[in-house]
Amino acid sequence: MLNFAELKQQLYSAVLSDVMDDLGLMHQAMRPFVRPVDDALVTMGRARTGLFVDTYSVREGENPYAVEIALLDDLKANDVPVLSCNGPTNRIAPWGELLTTASKARGAVGCVTDGLVRDVRHIRTLEFPVFHGGIGPLDSRGRARMIEMDTPVDCAGVRVCSGDIVFGDIDGVVVIPQQRAEEVIDRALTKVQSENHTRDELRQGRLLREVYEKYGVL
């Protein structure tokens, strides 16, 4: 069983992206418009997907948040909601303070969306890692609705399935397909060790060419 709390202290998005490139998984990094609310926070956990679509009204008696509430109430420890809004968008803000509070209480460890987020000051106070496609005050009510949960989605250019491993830090967000997670993480940990050795030798004045030939990382 993966220890996400320990792994996120050792890994970073760039090394995971490099390893997946080497394995032929070339499209696992979300587009660079997805940024953290707090640059200092890192998230790593299992994706729980939600698919949003544009709407332009709310029918009488309808609860436009029904599927979203179902997803949030079903979150487990180490889950990361990944909300696909066909971003970048200027009208869908599926995430804010109250969903952050609810998710943290359920044991979730972050949120990723290519839509907007709001209540940023409160989210930062909660120290909950949220990665977003923009910041704006708009409620999703009357503008968007989650229509599916736990189905494959495209979020910021990456196909994401519930159960995939999501890693986000200041450099961006990468997604590790669930069936390749063990292989990718093992290789990434090995590459981190090589990078540490490379860094130490460069500090000692060794030539970059020599160190690269020795460890093969750059």
Image (cartoon, rainbow, N blue to C red):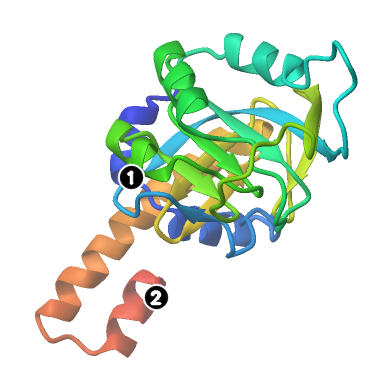
- Residue 28, given in percent of the width and then of the height, sits at 65, 53
Kind of element beneath mark 1: loop
Drawn side of residue 201 relative to residue 126, left or right: left
Drawn side of residue 162 relative to residue 210, left or right: right
Cβ atoms under marks 2 and 1 closer than 8 Å: no
Residue drawn at x 33%, y 75% as measured from the top left: 214
Residue 1 appearing in the image: no
Looking at this rendering, what residue extends furthest in the front direction? Answer: 60
- Residue 196, given in percent of the width and then of the height, sits at 24, 61
- Residue 175, given in percent of the width and then of the height, sits at 60, 44
Drawn side of residue 72 relative to residue 160, left or right: left
Residue drawn at x 72%, y 56% as measured from the top left: 89
Name the amino acid, label 2: Leu
| In this view, 193 is above or below 83 | below
Residue 218, labelled with which disc?
Answer: 2
Instruction: Check the picture and name the quadrant holding the C terminus.
Output: bottom left
Residue drawn at x 59%, y 9% as measured from the top left: 73
